[in-house]
């Protein structure tokens, strides 16, 4: 063995020992491996049963966190309705058949769905609407979009605020839960013809809008999504 081989072997052993001393020992203070799934879940971006946050999604029902004791009947729907009302009875009927149902979580998701549906309709975004609406409501929205397209009209809508999303109805029909929400919002909306002239609404005026929408879901289905099944307006 020549002198160069001995030098290279000695150098290799030295490097190995240095690397081991720096990288190969555990002190007990190391950071745990980064868990991407857990991080996304913590941010609400990877749960299958979460609120509406992205175009094309629908209202999902997140399961309730387990509690040590159920809330007393008098406090069960505190902040939503009074005990003994038709709304409270409807909520009771739904949660008795679906223990994961959380109306407060639903209202949060419905606010997002309301804005998404209004904007998708204004933009003629049929793909987003198809995921959010029942087939009957979709056909109605689609007919209105086709009418605008026929006359080469475009609608511009912008939300100023959603001031209230209030649960006003709850009902269980066989396997289908239906929830009705009153939305109070402010928005600016104008429809223009092909020349850019406003034919409906205003590009400057903030309008006070009250919509009453009903969402439904088959509670026996594994699909957690709610869809819009009825629309009305108090304006």
Image: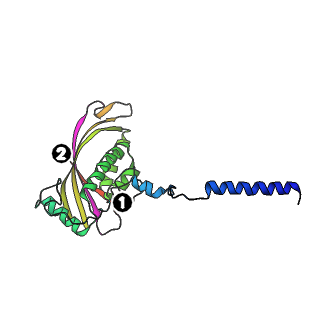
Q: Is residue 229 visible?
A: no
Provide the residue span drawn in magenta: 202-223
Q: Residue 207's quadrant in the figure?
A: top left
Label 2 sits on a secondary structure element that is loop
Name the foreground residue: 134 vs 26.
Answer: 26
The vertical placement of 110 against 216, above or below, is: above
**Residue identifier under label 2:** 234
Seen as rendered, the residue at the extreme left is 84
**Residue identifier under label 1:** 49
Check if residue 77 falls in the magenta segment.
no
Tell me the residue at 26%/53% (across/down).
Answer: 107
Check if residue 208 falls in the magenta segment.
yes
**Image-based side of 230 in relation to 56, left or right:** left
Name the foreground residue: 67 vs 152.
Answer: 67
Tag 2–tag 1 contact (CB < 8 Å): no
Seen as rendered, the residue at the extreme right is 2
Residue 210: where, in percent of width, then height?
Answer: 21, 44
């Amino acid at each position: 063995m020549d002198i160069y081989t001995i030098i290279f072997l000695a150098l290799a052993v030295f490097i190995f020992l240095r690397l081991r001393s720096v990288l190969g020992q555990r002190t007990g203070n190391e950071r745990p491996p980064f868990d991407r799934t857990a991080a996304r879940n913590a941010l609400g971006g990877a749960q299958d049963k979460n609120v509406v946050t992205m175009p094309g999604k629908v209202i999902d029902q997140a399961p309730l966190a387990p509690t040590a004791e159920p809330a007393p009947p008098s406090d069960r729907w505190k902040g939503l309705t009074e005990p003994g009302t038709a709304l409270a009875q409807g909520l009771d009927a739904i949660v008795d058949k679906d223990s994961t149902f959380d109306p407060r979580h639903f209202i949060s998701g419905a606010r997002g769905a309301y804005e998404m549906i209004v904007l998708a309709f204004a933009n003629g975004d049929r793909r987003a609407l198809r995921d959010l609406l029942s087939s009957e409501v979709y056909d109605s929205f689609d007919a209105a979009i086709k009418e605008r397209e026929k006359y080469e009209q475009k609608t511009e809508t912008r939300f100023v605020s959603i001031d209230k999303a209030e649960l006003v109805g709850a009902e269980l029909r066989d396997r289908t839960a239906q929830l009705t929400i009153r939305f109070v919002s402010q928005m600016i909306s104008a429809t223009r013809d092909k020349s850019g002239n406003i034919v409906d609404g205003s590009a400057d005026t903030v309008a006070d809008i009250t919509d009453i929408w009903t969402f439904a879901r088959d509670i026996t289905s594994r699909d957690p999504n709610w869809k819009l099944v009825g629309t009305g307006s108090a304006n």
